[in-house]
Image (spheres, grey):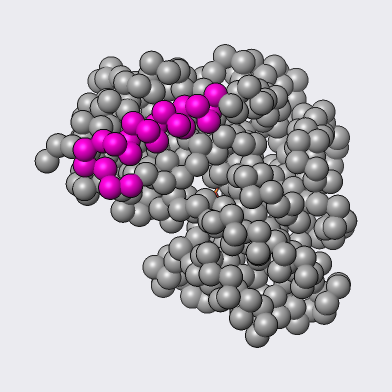
Amino acid sequence: MSTLMERDQAVVANTYRRFPVEVTHGKGSLLWDTDGKRYIDMGSGIGVTAFGIADDAWQAAVTAQLAQVQHTSNLYYTEPCVALAERLCARTGMSRVFFGNSGAEANECAVKVARKYAAEHKGPEYNVIVTLENSFHGRTLTTLAATGQEHFHELFQPLTPGFCHTPANDIEALEALVAEQKVAGILLECVQGEGGVNSLTKAYVTAVAALCEREDIVLMIDEVQTGNGRTGRLFSYEYYRIQPDVVTTAKGLGGGLPLGAVLLSDKVKDVLGFGDHGSTFGGNPVCCAGAVNVLDRLDDDFLAEVRRKSVYVFNELIKAEGVRSVTGMGLMVGIETVRPAADVVAACRENGVLCLTAKHKVRLLPALNIPWDVLKEAVTVLKNACKEG
Ligand SMILES: *Cc1c(COP(=O)(O)O)cnc(C)c1O
């Protein structure tokens, strides 16, 4: 009898470098493998299981909807989809929401909104989308074009044309690009996740927002990873005191079920009309019921607790032996270590803590409700792993 790892390697596409852990089940921030070993989950499925594994309240919301109707298509109205859109609009000041199933699809939709808006307001030659170097926006051919990392592009040419990349935090470079290209929209992550957990400066984001306003460029914020409480605010752009035209989100929104959303401001809320866009699964009632539960629990007190946990993690790690720097916001943390990040992650795994990497850093994206004692246990293991070797 071959192991699960061997069976997977034989028949599942070889696109992931998986860690050698066969997960059977979990609860909250704990996971167990086929050998019965317990792990603390400091990655939450790459920032997806916002309230941990098999959370009771989330599970109740999902199973209640599952027993009613699991899918209708977008030809009919369902309560969870409307309830979720109402909440997202009320919490952000946005005007409409388009639902899809993933982050990449959310960004695809945003690009369509920006291009159609520009075509109608400035002319179809205004079709360039500007993104940042070192960004990550997804794996489809269009969102790969948006992703400012050449190594993702190499073997998949031609990508969708009309994308330009500019260095982060360099407003002169962006202004020069806008002066020479016919720009429809700018798409940014306030904290680059896959790129190494790097935050944009407040001065830069404020200047970008002013430039977009002045030039009537659609400002799109990619909150796929940073959204839904991850940074200690509902959305990370709130820290920058800007009001984007479009916000894309996914990952943590569904609490573990596939769900993406595109939030549209008043300015662009009617850009897409009948037949302009669609998704068979988008706004699925089971996924939306889970997301309503997630959003309703991300209240001010809860977000304040996320920020307190963040302060604890930053303070502990910044002074730890073997740690060069700590970056990020809220419970989205990048740690530059003296040892190679992969070695630190492997040592943590041996000792029952599952962490992620981002570029050359160790990355943490724990469940937002990780209990204090579990968090402290994980930080202790991580500090030991940073100092060894
Ligand atoms: C994960 C991620 C995406 C892609 O999301 P998928 O759901 O994998 O398509 C896009 N943008 C950012 C910032 C991400 O972190």
- Residue 81: image location, x then y, percent: 77, 34
Above or below, 259 relative to 216: above
Residue 323 location in percent, x, y? 26, 43
Q: Which quadrant holds the N terminus? A: top left
39 horizontally vs 330: left or right: left
Tell me how many marks there are. Answer: 0
Please identify the residue farthest to the bottom as the structure is shown.
180
Q: Position of residue 290 (x, y in %)?
A: 65, 27
Q: Quadrant of residue 181?
A: bottom right
Rendered location of residue 311, percent (x, y): 45, 31
Question: Outermost residue, left direction?
Answer: 389
| Residue 347: in magenta span | no
- Asked whether, in this view, residue 71 is left or right of residue 15, the answer is right
Q: Residue at x 58, y 66 (%)?
A: 131
Q: Is residue 3 visible?
A: no
Q: Nearer the viewer, residue 87 or 305?
A: 305
- Quadrant position of residue 376: top left
Q: Main secondary structure of the magenta part?
A: helix
Most foreground residue, 262 or 73:
262
Specify whether residue 312 is painted magenta: yes
Provide the residue span drawn in magenta: 305-325
Q: Which residue is drawn at 45% across and 53% down?
A: 198
Would residue 189 appear left or right of 25 to someone viewing this image? right
Residue 297 quadrant? top right
Above or below, 199 against 134 in this view is above
**Figure quadrant of the C terminus:** top left
Residue sitting nearer the eye, 132 or 224: 132
Taking the spot 81% from the left edge, 35% from the top edge, the residue there is 90
Q: In this view, does 129 lie above or below 86?
A: below
Query: Does residue 36 show up?
Result: yes
Residue at (85%, 58%) from the top-left corner?
267
Left or right: where does residue 340 sit relative to residue 225?
left
